[in-house]
């Protein structure tokens, strides 16, 4: 994958030597210029044509042009099996990753100075960019636009973490998201109740990939970083506070704010101490650095939510604390913001209260997270044997409720898409080529469920409909949101949009290839993709898949965030 402005002075290639691409860039430039010069006589708006795809034998080329040709992203695949839609989605994530680092102001820079080398601004983000591409090309969860969670974790432990995040964040102004993650896998998160401010799947993937590809976050203590979430607002930065909760398990806390002030950082730092202590994750270093004042704040917080150290139980109400009154007062023990800011880093040695749980392997959260990978592998193997499948991919959409945990329809806004990706069973277990083929077939099945066809013509029609919906939208707010999406950003993300959107009707589709049958089913808030032996008849395969769906949904409390919380 490489991208360049109209003048092919800047090139970035994922494979091979970029110096060898000079002639290719020149050829591509001619193609783009020729296509752009062709006017559509049937188009009353006289808009210029824009090249999207080229197919030559097994080679497929996808293009994504940003702005008025400010930047063009190009992806080339020689496998012949990858769908054009999925190839285009990889380019969309590349552009989203650029926005994540620079915001869409990069377009203005390239339009003003087409010869500008963008690498000067991107800096040392190669590993992050490669990370998102590696995940898209090797992890089929992107086909469903769902996120994987750290699982299996007992539901009471996950909900207790959610409740602590909710109660802590409920007292902080300007907080947008609170996330606990292990690498690229989500433990839990809390987000705003307002539909237009809730996180989108692409933005969440970008955050999780960033945490996963920055191992220094586990050892560098607290970090305060600017980042752009394209679907929230592509032209502005938000600011992320990251803190390692536990090195052994990789638990990481991410708090996101719209403000970049030192006061906001200090509030997040205190909130991080509160969360870490309430989860029972304090270590000896924390005990030495937490001041007496901070200890009082932590104890006051735990008393408020009915928690004294993290025990893994459900203790206390899920309501958290009220936002009435001065939000800062709760954190600073009645002082004002200036008092809080003046405290700075004046930490003193203090003894832990006897109620605190030491960080050992017996801490229920740490123990569950450390055991999760092996337990998940065993559990997924059981599911595969249960339904006689070689592999399955399961998407489950969980409604996001208000912070009071109500399940009434009035409190529902959006849905959080989860994904469970099973291990590969024999004969696919050690065959990378077959695993790649499975992923490519899943892409075609996903398009079949949505549009009845996986041909490029159906994809182009879907793209046209996507752009038409964006152009015809009249429901704008201050960020120009269209049905919960920022139109200024999602206009460049059609493939991600069509994979994210659930099929409009419930359906079943399948195809056979040699000794394997590939099947896809969808229903209310779920999709399943599976590989079965081709000797099984389609009706029996459908029954086995339906059986697997019922089993997964009955056990979903172990794998998913079944009660996502929000704050007002």
Image (spheres, rainbow, N blue to C red):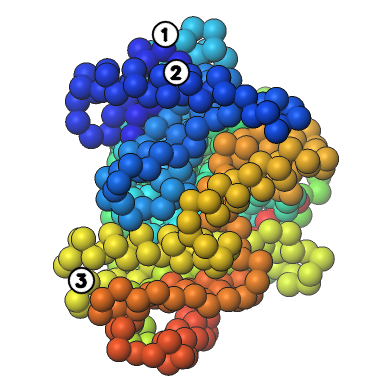
Mark drawn on residue 100: none
x 68%, y 28%: residue: 41
Question: Is residue 491 rendered to the left or right of residue 281?
Answer: right
Q: Secondary structure at mark 2?
A: loop
Q: Secondary structure at mark 3?
A: loop
x 22%, y 19%: residue: 19
Mark drawn on residue 115: 1
x 29%, y 23%: residue: 24
Image location of residue 27, percent across then percent down: 34, 21
- Whole-angstrom CA distance, mark 3 to mark 1, is 47 Å
Mark 3 Cα shell of 10 Å, populated few (<14), some (14-19), many (≥20): few
Mark 2 Cα shell of 10 Å, populated few (<14), some (14-19), many (≥20): many
Of residue 163 and residue 403, the one placed in the foreground of this image is: 403
User: Residue beneath label 2, please?
Assistant: 5
Image location of residue 543, percent across then percent down: 47, 90
- Whole-angstrom CA distance, mark 3 to mark 2, is 42 Å
Q: Residue extending furthest front? A: 41
User: Residue beneath label 3, please?
Assistant: 429
Q: Is residue 422 visible?
A: yes
- Whole-angstrom CA distance, mark 1 to mark 2, is 8 Å
Quadrant in which residue 472 is drawn: top right
Q: Are marks 1 and 2 in contact (CB under 8 Å)?
A: yes
């Amino acid at each position: 994958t490489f991208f360049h402005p109209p003048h092919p002075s800047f090139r970035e290639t994922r494979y091979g030597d970029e110096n060898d691409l000079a002639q290719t860039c020149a050829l591509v430039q001619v193609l783009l210029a020729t296509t752009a010069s062709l006017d559509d006589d049937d188009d009353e708006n006289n808009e210029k044509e824009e090249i999207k795809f080229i197919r030559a034998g097994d080679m497929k080329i996808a293009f994504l042009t940003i702005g008025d040709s400010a930047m063009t992203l190009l992806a080339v695949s020689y496998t012949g099996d990858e769908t054009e839609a999925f190839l285009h989605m990889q380019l969309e994530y590349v552009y989203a990753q650029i926005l994540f680092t620079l915001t869409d102001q990069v377009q203005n820079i390239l339009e003003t100075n087409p010869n500008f080398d963008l690498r000067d601004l991107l800096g040392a983000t190669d590993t992050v960019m490669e990370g998102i591409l590696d995940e898209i090309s090797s992890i089929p969860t992107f086909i469903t636009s769902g996120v994987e969670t750290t699982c299996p974790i007992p539901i009471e432990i996950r909900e207790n973490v959610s409740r602590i995040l909710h109660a802590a964040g409920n007292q902080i102004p300007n907080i947008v998201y609170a996330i606990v993650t292990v690498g690229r896998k989500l433990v839990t998160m809390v987000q705003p109740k307002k539909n237009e401010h809730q996180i989108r799947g692409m933005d969440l993937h970008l955050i999780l990939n960033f945490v996963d590809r920055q191992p220094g976050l586990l050892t560098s203590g607290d970090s305060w970083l600017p980042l752009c979430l394209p679907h929230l607002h592509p032209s502005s930065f938000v600011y992320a506070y990251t803190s390692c909760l536990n090195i052994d398990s990789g638990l990481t806390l991410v708090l996101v704010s719209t403000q970049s002030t030192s006061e906001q950082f200090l509030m997040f730092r205190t909130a991080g101490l509160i969360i870490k202590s309430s989860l029972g994750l304090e270590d000896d270093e924390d005990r030495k650095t937490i001041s007496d004042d901070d200890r009082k704040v932590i104890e006051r917080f735990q008393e408020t939510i009915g928690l004294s150290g993290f025990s893994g139980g459900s203790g206390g109400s899920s309501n958290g604390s009220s936002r009435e009154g001065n939000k800062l007062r709760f954190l600073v023990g009645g002082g004002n913001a200036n008092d809080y800011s003046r405290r700075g880093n004046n930490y003193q040695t203090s003894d832990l209260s006897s109620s605190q749980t030491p960080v050992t392997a017996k801490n229920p959260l740490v123990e569950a997270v450390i055991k999760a990978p092996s337990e998940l592998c065993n559990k997924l193997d059981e599911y595969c044997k249960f339904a006689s499948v070689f592999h399955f991919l399961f998407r489950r959409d969980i409604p996001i409720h208000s912070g009071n945990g109500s399940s009434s329809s009035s409190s529902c806004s959006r849905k959080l898409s989860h994904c469970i990706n099973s291990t590969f069973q024999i004969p696919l277990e050690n065959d990378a080529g077959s695993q790649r083929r499975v992923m490519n077939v899943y892409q075609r099945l996903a398009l079949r469920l949505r549009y009845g066809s996986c041909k490029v013509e159906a994809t182009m029609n879907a793209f046209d409909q996507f752009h038409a919906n964006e152009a015809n939208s009249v429901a704008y707010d201050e960020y120009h949101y269209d049905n919960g999406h920022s139109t200024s950003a999602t206009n460049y993300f059609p493939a991600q949009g069509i994979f994210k959107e659930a099929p409009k009707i419930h359906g079943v589709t399948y195809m056979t290839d040699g000794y394997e049958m590939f099947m896809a089913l969808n229903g209310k808030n779920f999709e399943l993709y599976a590989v079965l032996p081709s000797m099984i008849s389609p009706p029996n395969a459908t029954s086995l898949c339906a059986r697997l769906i019922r089993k997964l949904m009955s056990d979903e409390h172990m794998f998913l965030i079944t009660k996502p919380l929000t704050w007002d």
